[in-house]
Image (cartoon, rainbow, N blue to C red):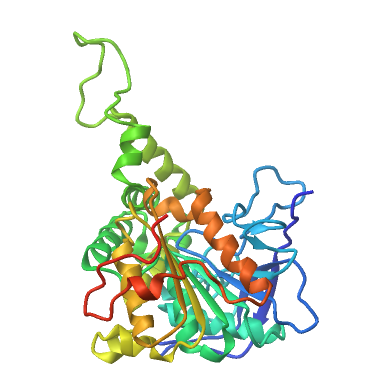
Amino acid sequence: MPLIATPQSQHFADALPLQSGAALRDYSLSFETYGTLNAERSNAVLICHALNASHHVAGVYEGQANSEGWWDNMIGPGKPVDTDRFFVIGVNNLGSCFGSTGPMHANPDAPAGSGRVYGADFPVVTVEDWVNAQARLLDALNIQTLAAVMGGSLGGMQALSWTLQYPNRVRHAVVVASAPNLTAENIAFNEVARRAIVTDPDFHGGHFYEHGTVPKRGLRIARMIGHITYLSDDVMNEKFGRQLRKAVLGSADGYKYSTQDVEFQIESYLRYQGDKFAEYFDANTYLLITRALDYFDPARAFGGDLSQALKRATCKFLLVSFTTDWRFSPKRSREMVKALLDNQRDVSYAEIDAPHGHDAFLLDDPRYMGVVRSYFDSMAHGAAPTVGSAVRAAFSKSDEVTSVGATL
């Protein structure tokens, strides 16, 4: 029997103070839970999502075909994060477009009776704001301590932030394909994608809802840019290579020579991904979430010293990276591992030799799944996790980490 998912919502009347100095009141968080909370309320695992995901982490919606959660291969009965053992919670972040309060919702500060939605007036949110909102949800669920917080990419940033903002509420953190901050190159990719959206004539300064339009052209380009960065060069070459699409006859070799039409298979694939994304994702949400990515930098308050920043963390860690992930490269995970070891924290680290690029954290690599399964199995049995146990010996205390704890 498949795991059946049931969306839930929690309303909060009290205003949530934000890092920007603004506050959000009368907001709701959409979430789903899987498994059973034990009598001690000690087996809860919080899953934090990345850019275009949601609270629908695992299982299917009853009666809906093709409704699997975005991490269904990872979470469920008998899976690496076993819902027969753990009570798993998936939360949709504020500002998203999948149920939690966001730009598409009514603005309580708008004139009474206007029905005006937030649009571009939705306040800027940060990773830290999301974590504070998630902590309020756990309070509402009467869960004081998490067995683990877990996430990949932007979700991994949230998991890391949990260990710094609420160190006494987290026993384990699983940070996958993530980084302690974005590189300048990553910020640049995000900015180009945002420019594509805000310069779309249908954007209307973020208030496109009132005009009955959607900036689909900008969203398509933003998704195409992002998708290029999620895949490795090897995967692109293997899937598409330089294969051309045969079109109308007219040239000597049967191809349509053009500077504007789709000629290569990779072009067709990117346009398909862009078209699909523009049908379901909100433009203002894209701006908010990519900016939250840009702002995240726990070391900023410590003069860039990550070791000092991570001193507040007290839980045990599993970090996983992938060799071909050039957007969140293994080097960035090693920075976090070294900073944690500088503080004598309990760290396991696995670097997976996988060809899939950043998307690898969503895929079924058996080594990756085995690492996570082993870690959660140890956690469930109350034993000290042993994944990457050689990590302390492999990582030096020098300024540069030159070796890897576990390459699989």
Q: Position of residue 209 (x, y in %)?
A: 47, 61
Query: From what the image shows, is residue 1 above or below residue 182?
Result: above
Residue positioned 38% across, 86% down in the render: 310
Does residue 54 appear in this view?
no
Q: Quadrant of residue 300?
A: bottom left
Q: Is residue 122 left or right of residue 115?
A: left
Report the residue at 60% width, 64% height from top.
Answer: 55
Q: Position of residue 319 (x, y in %)?
A: 44, 69
Q: Nearer the viewer, residue 189 or 59?
A: 59
**Quarter-wise, where is residue 34 in the image?**
bottom right
Query: Is any atom of residue 178 visible in this view?
Result: yes
Depth check: give the residue in front, 359 or 28.
359
- Height in image: 321 above or below 267? below
Q: How many marks?
A: 0
Q: As rendered, which of 347 and 81 lies closer to the eye?
A: 347
For the C terminus, the image quarter is bottom left
Instruction: Give the left or right position of residue 325, taking residue 168 as reference.
Output: left
